[in-house]
Amino acid sequence: MSDQILFEEKQYLGTNKMHLLIRLVIATGCFSLYHFSAADDETKELFFILGTTALVISALLLLVLHISTVVSPGSIVLDGFWMARRVKIDLSSIVSAQVTIYPRFMMHRAVYNLHMKGTIKFFTKGSQAVLLTDRDGLKYCIGSQKAKELCAAIEKQIQTAKV
């Protein structure tokens, strides 16, 4: 029963709009400089290589898993990429769960296990998050593309834990 998955979501690093836009602007600038450079200029080829490299990196980042969110009976498991520690949140200590708008202060930077002002944040892209509060007052802000479904799965587990 503990292996049952109630909700699962994977968020990829390359889909963060802010960083994707920055990489595309850099590539566009490189290709523009390549196009408008003098024909005998040595740096013309360098701009083409830099633009192509920026596009290849953007394409590869679309395949890099940033956060995997899994809700199973009794816990939420947030698994990050490469050497990041797996975070397991025990749902028996969670008092409330609510869907909220992800704060725009950080311009939607991709974060994993960021401790800031009493809140632990996990976010890749989008504008919605689920705000969890535990018995000790610690808050977890989990960004999600399916925030309502995630919140419903968590609230269902909180209700079954109370019974």
Image (tube, rainbow, N blue to C red):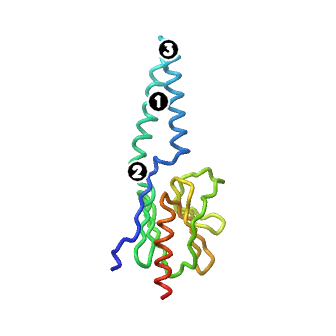
Identify the disc placed on residue 37: none
> According to the image, label 3 marks what residue?
41
The N terminus, quarter of image: bottom left
- Report helix, strand or loop for mark 3: loop
> Residue 159: where, in percent of width, then height?
49, 82
Task: Count the numbered circles shown.
Answer: 3
Could you give the CA–CA distance between mark 3 and mark 1, rounded to whole angstroms?
Answer: 17 Å
Side of 131 relative to 73 (left or right)? right
Q: Is 120 situated above or below 42?
A: below
Label annotation for residue 51: 1
As measured in the structure, the alpha-carbon distance from the residue carrying label 1 to the one carrying label 2 is 21 Å
| Residue in the picture at 62% in, 50% down | 107
Left or right of 131: which side holds 5? left
Q: CA distance from mark 3 to mark 2?
A: 36 Å
Q: Which amino acid does the dot numbered 3 rest on?
A: Asp
Q: Residue at x 63, y 63 (%)?
A: 116
Q: Tell me the element at label 2.
A: loop
Determine whether label 3 and label 1 are within 8 Å by CB: no
Percent from the top left, x then y, of residue 91? 49, 78
Among the 4 quarters of the image, the one containing residue 78 = bottom left
Front residue (pair 95, 87): 95
Q: Which residue is mark 2?
A: 64
Q: Identify which amino acid the numbered label 1 is placed on.
A: Gly
Q: Residue furthest bottom?
A: 163
Q: Amino acid at mark 2?
A: Val
Label 3 crowd bin: few (<14), some (14–19), many (20+), radius 10 Å: few
Q: Check disc 1 and report its element: helix, strand or loop.
A: helix
First of labels 3, 1 by sequence position = 3
